[in-house]
Amino acid sequence: MKGVRILQGLVLVCILMIPVLVIVFLKSFGTNYYDIPVFFEKGVENPFQECDVSENDQHYIPDFELISHQNISMGRKEMEGKITIVDFFFTSCPSICPVMSAEMERVDDAFRDIDEVQIYSISIDPEYDTPEVLQAYAERHNATPGKWQFLTGDKERIYDLARCGFILPTLDGYGEPDDFVHSDKFVLVDELGRIRGYYSGTNREDVDLLILETKILLHGK
């Protein structure tokens, strides 16, 4: 009988200790930190001096201005205070662009009602991709008006922006779709104009990570 009472007492103590243990656990492990890197904090490597960039200080997206599919001037100024997801593509691309644009549709849908997030899809074939062509492309991909911008402009400036601003490889195909070379990366840029991540726009898991890290940046603003 005495042993039963001791056992009952131990059970009661254990029950009473559960809330205490939960509180200790939450205090010890309840705060999680997800560190999203800041790229090029110590500048950009520029061995051939082809880019006008800092080689020692934090790299920021430089000033630029292009024309959207709605014939509106858009650029660096409109990125201020917003999280911007950027890719380089062209509408006649026969290879990776259709996949990238399909994946960007998912990104657009994920942030459809969030004004602090926007998308820039910049054409590397501006001679063909006029605002009218880009408008049709935007409609085909159900782009949210005012959020997902398709941009075109001066070719030389666009290629310089890709290579020296967003630090992405880009080569002109001179009118031949198969000869254009550009990255499949989606670039995550924070509200200060710093690059925070590169994600393959042809890989669903990478795009899922982009969406997650965009949400984290959004809540950290």
Image: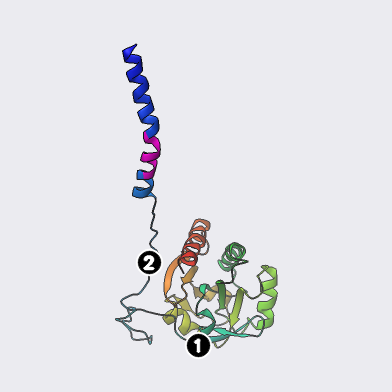
> Residue 65: which numbered mark, if any?
none
Q: Quadrant of the N terminus?
A: top left
State left or right for residue 33 relative to residue 188. Answer: left
Q: Position of residue 55 (x, y in %)?
A: 31, 82
Q: Badge 2: how crowded within 10 Å, few (<14), some, or many (20+)? A: few
Q: Nearer the viewer, residue 99 or 199?
A: 199
Report which residue position mark 2 lands on.
Answer: 37
Asked which quadrant contains residue 131, the reply is: bottom right
Relative to 160, say whether 89 is above or below: above
Is residue 29 rendered magenta in the image?
Answer: no
**Magenta region:** 17-23
Q: Nearer the viewer, residue 8 or 210?
A: 8
* Direction top: furthest residue: 1
Q: Secondary structure at mark 2?
A: loop
Q: Nearer the viewer, residue 121 or 215?
A: 215
Q: Position of residue 187 (x, y in %)?
A: 47, 70
Task: Looking at the image, tell me whether mark 1 or mark 2 is earlier in sequence order.
Answer: 2
Q: Are marks 1 and 2 in contact (CB under 8 Å)?
A: no
Report which residue position mark 1 lands on.
Answer: 156
Q: Position of residue 117 (x, y in %)?
A: 55, 70
State left or right for residue 129 relative to residue 189. Answer: right
Q: Secondary structure at mark 1?
A: helix
- Residue 173, visible in the rendered structure: no
Is residue 19 rendered magenta in the image?
Answer: yes
Asked which quadrant contains residue 35, the reply is: bottom left
